[in-house]
Structure formats: C-alpha cells, structure tokens
C-alpha cells in the first residue's frame, strides 16, 4: 500500500461501499487517509448503516463499519469515517487532486470500482462467505459476488459542460440482460485518475449516452458547491487543497478553468465581496499606472460609465465589482482581463480562488 506523498491509483485502497437500508444499493470509494473513504453522496444518501470492504477474497482482505461524516449533495461527494482501522493498515496519506482545463483536449484516465456487470457465481463456499453479493444487495444470495473493474479510457473535457461533469469514454460492457437496471450500478463513487492525480468522482451513467459513457463530478467544481465547513472538512480529512493551490494534472497543458460568476445576484452584501476585492487590489498590474483603466477599456463600456470612481484603489475596485454585478457576464470579463494583463501569478491564483468561493452564491 502506498504511503503519504505517493501518487496514482492503489488497488488496496479501493473500497466496496456496502449500504444497508436500501435493497440493492452499493457503490465504490477510495481511502483518502487512515480513517476516511471518499465516495459519491448519492451512494450513501439515507443509509441506515454503511460498511466498507477492501481486497475481498484476497490475503489482505478487511472490512469495517463506517459512518457518513460529510454528504455534499450539490457536489455529489461524501466522506465516510472508518471504525476500527487495523493497526497494520495505517500510514495512508491523501491522494493528489488536480483540475482539467476547459479546452479542446482528450485525456487518458483510469478508475476502479465494482459495477453490477461484474457479478460472478462463486465456485466455493469460502468465496461466497467473504465476497457474497448478498451483503448489501438482495438480502443475501449465496454463491454470488461482485468483482472489481479497472476501467480505462478517455475524458472528453468539453462534453457535459452544462452539467459540469467529465464525460468518460469506456469500453462498453456486454449487452445488458436487465434493461431496467444499468450494468454500471455500483461504479458510482470511484475516483477518476489522470496524470497521477484525482480529477473527479464517478457520479452517473446516463442511459441515453449508451453503455460506453459515464459521467464524473469534476474536482475543480467542488469548490463552488461546498460550504466553508464542508471544504474545511475535505481539507482535514481528505487532503483537498485550497482552490488556489489546485494545479492541473501532470501532462495536461492549459490554464485552470475559471469559475463563471454570471449568475451572482446583483445585491450581494459588501462583506461577501471583500475577499475578491482584496485579491484584486493585491494584483500588481492594478496597483500602479493605468492598469485598472486598461482592464475597464477591455470590457463592457457600461461598467466604466456607471461605476462610482474613487481615487482610493480599494473603494474604486468595490465600486467596479458592484457595477459588474448589475450587468451579468461583465464580472467574468473583468477577471479574464486581469488574467491577461497580469499573466500567471500567485496573485491571480488568489483572485481565482476568491472567485470560486464567491460562486457559491449563484442562484
């Protein structure tokens, strides 16, 4: 088992998530620390109890009860806290997380989980006892178990933009013998890996897309959906970095995608804008000369015409940002102009992080 600082999918950390309380429900997950498993929120929604199992029917098999300590439905991510972690199973560090750019790229990925089409009939009593499909499904069916599935394929980054998910192109499973059930049931919660980092969590199989497509929630979209308390819990328990520290997956070119702010309400209180205003006033290109004037010249002229200008930079930026809120889309124009003027820098990363946190107020 890989320890802290080591990257890439580790099969020993892949979890079967067995849910009691809803017949037929199970999912996949991944250990992101000694005592925590990351999965999809819908997998454990309404669960009476949860159990996680690792390395079923293998020499290192172990399982333990778990409880849901975070369930963020908007991001479709959940954290499970494992009870009674064996002493020889400690020393697990968090994975690395990364973003993918909103660009014309197709990226390789891998994931590992336990989809329904991997149902098997066991050939021995031992197999059916330790890996039985009935544990969490159909109330107990001796001789049946679900095997692991290592999925590889490509991510078409520009697909599913409206939904905000990654489209995963995979090898289609055999013809579905149960048309009313997806053969991919149980794959939800599997982490999606690219360039040695986690870029998403499998969230859905849209039947209209065919058997060779899955959808996964994007890591960079979590920040706009998580509350401050949820983001802090993900940082402490799952190792999720601050938005400003989230880089691109290894081997991926381009800038980190920006968060859209066009849907922000026009009457946001000043206190909610403070972090973004502070970040903007710290950008060197805006602090001297005519930087702010150049930015205003490159966006809608309605902003400059209707902003209450002030010789004090902080007050001036407050007025410009408040005016942008009255004209949807112009705040995004403003931030993009700053990115182009300043170029890549820690201050621009800080601005993007503040924008991502502000996006939680979108209607």
Image (cartoon, rainbow, N blue to C red):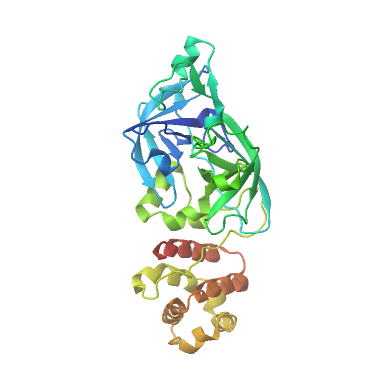
Q: Residue at x 37, y 41 (%)?
A: 45
Q: Is residue 34 left or right of residue 283?
A: left
Q: Would you place residue 53 above or below residue 324 in this image?
A: above
Q: Is residue 13 left or right of residue 272?
A: right
Q: Nearer the viewer, residue 119 or 352?
A: 119
Q: Pinpoint residue 64: horizontal percent, then vertical percent.
A: 38, 26
Mark yes or no: residue 70 visible. Answer: yes
Q: Pinpoint residue 175: horizontal percent, then vertical percent.
A: 61, 33
Q: Residue at x 40, y 41 (%)?
A: 79
Q: Pinpoint residue 198: horizontal percent, then vertical percent.
A: 55, 44
Q: Nearer the viewer, residue 6 or 153?
A: 153
Q: Residue at x 44, y 36 (%)?
A: 37
Task: Count every numbered label the image shows and give the total.
Answer: 0
Q: Quadrant of residue 348?
A: bottom right
> What quarter of the picture does the N terminus occupy?
top right
> What quarter of the picture does the C terminus occupy?
bottom left
Q: Would you place residue 254 above or below residue 116 in this image?
A: below
Mark yes or no: residue 1 visible. Answer: no
Query: Please, which residue is most extreme toward the top here?
Result: 125
Q: Nearer the viewer, residue 127 or 223?
A: 127
Q: Pinpoint residue 240: horizontal percent, then vertical percent.
A: 47, 47
Query: Please, which residue is most extreme toward the left here?
Result: 48
């Amino acid at each position: 088992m890989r320890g802290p600082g080591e990257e890439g999918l580790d099969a020993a950390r892949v979890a079967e998530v067995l849910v009691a309380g809803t017949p037929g429900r199970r999912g996949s997950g991944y250990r992101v620390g000694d005592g925590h498993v990351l999965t999809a929120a819908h997998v454990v929604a309404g669960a009476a109890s949860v159990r996680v199992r690792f390395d079923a029917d293998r020499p290192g098999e172990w399982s333990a009860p778990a409880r849901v300590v975070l369930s963020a439905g908007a991001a479709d991510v959940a954290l499970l806290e494992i009870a009674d972690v064996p002493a020889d199973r400690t020393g697990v560090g968090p994975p690395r997380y990364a973003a993918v750019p909103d660009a014309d790229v197709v990226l390789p990925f891998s994931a590992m989980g336990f989809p329904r089409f991997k149902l098997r009939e066991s050939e021995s009593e031992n197999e059916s006892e330790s890996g039985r499909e009935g544990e969490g499904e159909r109330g107990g069916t001796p001789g049946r178990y679900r095997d692991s599935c290592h999925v590889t394929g490509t991510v078409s980054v520009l697909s599913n933009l409206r939904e905000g998910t990654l489209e995963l192109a995979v090898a289609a499973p055999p013809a579905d013998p149960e048309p009313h059930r997806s053969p991919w049931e149980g794959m939800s919660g599997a982490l999606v890996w690219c360039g040695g980092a986690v870029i998403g969590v499998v969230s859905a199989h849209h039947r209209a897309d065919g058997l060779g497509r899955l959808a996964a929630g994007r890591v960079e979209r979590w920040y706009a959906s998580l509350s401050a308390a949820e983001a802090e819990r993900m940082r402490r328990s799952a190792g999720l970095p601050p938005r400003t520290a989230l880089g691109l997956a290894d081997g991926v070119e381009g800038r980190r995608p920006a968060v859209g702010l066009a849907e922000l309400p026009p009457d946001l209180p000043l206190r909610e804008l403070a972090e973004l205003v502070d970040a903007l006033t710290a950008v060197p290109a805006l602090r001297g000369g005519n930087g702010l004037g150049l930015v205003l010249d490159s966006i809608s002229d309605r902003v400059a015409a209707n902003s209450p200008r002030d010789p004090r930079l902080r007050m001036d930026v407050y007025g410009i940002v408040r005016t942008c809120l009255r004209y949807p889309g112009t705040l995004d124009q403003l931030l993009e102009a700053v990115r182009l003027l300043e170029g890549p820098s820690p201050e621009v990363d800080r601005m993007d992080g503040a924008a991502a946190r502000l996006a939680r107020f979108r209607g």
